[in-house]
Image: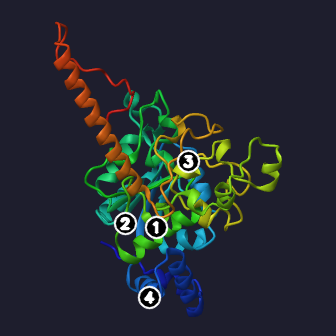
Amino acid sequence: MAEKPTFHDVFMQRGVSRRDFLGFCAMTATYLGLGPDGPGIIANAMQTKPRIPVLWLHGLECTCCSESFLRSGHPLASEIVLSMISLDYDDTIMAAAGDQAEEILHDIVRDYRGAYLLAVEGNVPLANDGMACIVGGRPFKKKFEEMARHAKAIISWGTCASSGCVQTAKPNPTGATPIHKLVDRVPVINVPGCPPIAEVMTGVISYILTYDRLPELDRQLRPKLFYSQRVHDKCSRRAHFDAGQFVESWDDEGARQGWCLYKMGCRGPTTYNACATIGWNENTSSPIRSGHGCIGCSEEGFWDRGPFYERLPDMQQWGIESNADKVAAVGATVLGSAVAVQLGATALKRMIKPRAGGEAGATESSGSGEPQA
């Protein structure tokens, strides 16, 4: 296997000073919340580890994740793309095309089998043998299968790759399927959002490069570094929610005063993401700060969860320190109790009213329309 130069080597070749290099490590450590030892850990990793080969594939998507990534502020996307990783293939921004570009994929698999990262933007349509997404003259699903089989890990960029996004909205005619449902032997990390925050994307890569492992993930395979708290918990309008000050219509006095958007359909109370803390465009703003409620784009199935401008029917008070796993655990307990009650009720009905013929044991079709991975 050919050895890649280290991140530090590339920085020095580009004329970056030692002082600036250490400043970069300190900034990244702060960003990832690594504590006082973080800068030293990152600096050591950058100076000793070879750059990671990365292949970036595009399935069924709109390319907004790439647009977001290229606008990251800290660290700069150019530093990530040109220095921290060895981005060997990205059919959206690379100069090569056709057979010349496709040959790169085969070279990487041959030289770095089991050692490269596979970044996937978009999902994989399975209906009609994958004809809804053709890349290089063949279905994208075949290209994905070949590259995923030998990857060290897979990063699912955006909600399209993580959970399907609008393409999987009912009735999902293309059979669009998120990445983690197609892979069982290679670790997958979901980085949802439509698009994901640029600094979250670069932060995930920085963590993997530094520690040579994936960050801790929640039940939806999202890194807890960025998806452990609700948007509602750190919302700039949270004080108005607690004070009972709500926007009632888009042009009322509450809207002009920047009050809470919960009654206008804001999904911040049920959405886990770092929008309220990291923000967008170098923390210039965020959807809620700009006057639009959160639409919950980093949550599974958000597109089918009713109109975006209607109030959530009931909002549970989970507490600021709750996270996605705790909420899911409580939900599972409640669901388990409900199932137990239902089973008890069913048994009771059978005792009271003996079954009179019919198709014993028949089951009801779910009719979910979910694609089969």
Residue in front for this viewpoint, 217 or 41: 217
On the image, numbered disc 3 is attached to which residue? 296
For marks 3 and 4 on the same chain, the one whose residue lies earlier in the sequence: 4
Q: Is 9 or 248 nearer to us in this picture?
A: 248
Nearer to us in this view, 355 or 366: 355
The amino acid marked with disc number 2 is Glu
Q: Residue 273, image x and y in percent?
A: 53, 58
Q: Which residue is mark 1?
A: 225
Using the rendered view, name the quadrant where residue 81 is placed. bottom right
Element at badge 3?
loop
From mark 1 to mark 4, how far is it between C-alphas? 17 Å
The alpha-carbon separation of the residues under discs 1 and 3 comes to 18 Å
Location of residue 24 in the rendering, given as x and y in whole percent from the top left corner: 56, 83
Question: Which of disc 4 and disc 1 is earlier in sequence?
Answer: 4
Per the model, the C-alpha gap separating discs 2 and 4 is 19 Å
Looking at the rendered structure, the secondary structure element under dot 2 is loop
Q: Do the numbered discs 1 and 4 sit on residues whose CB atoms are within 8 Å?
A: no
Where's the N terminus, which quadrant?
bottom left
x then y, percent, for residue 219: 36, 54
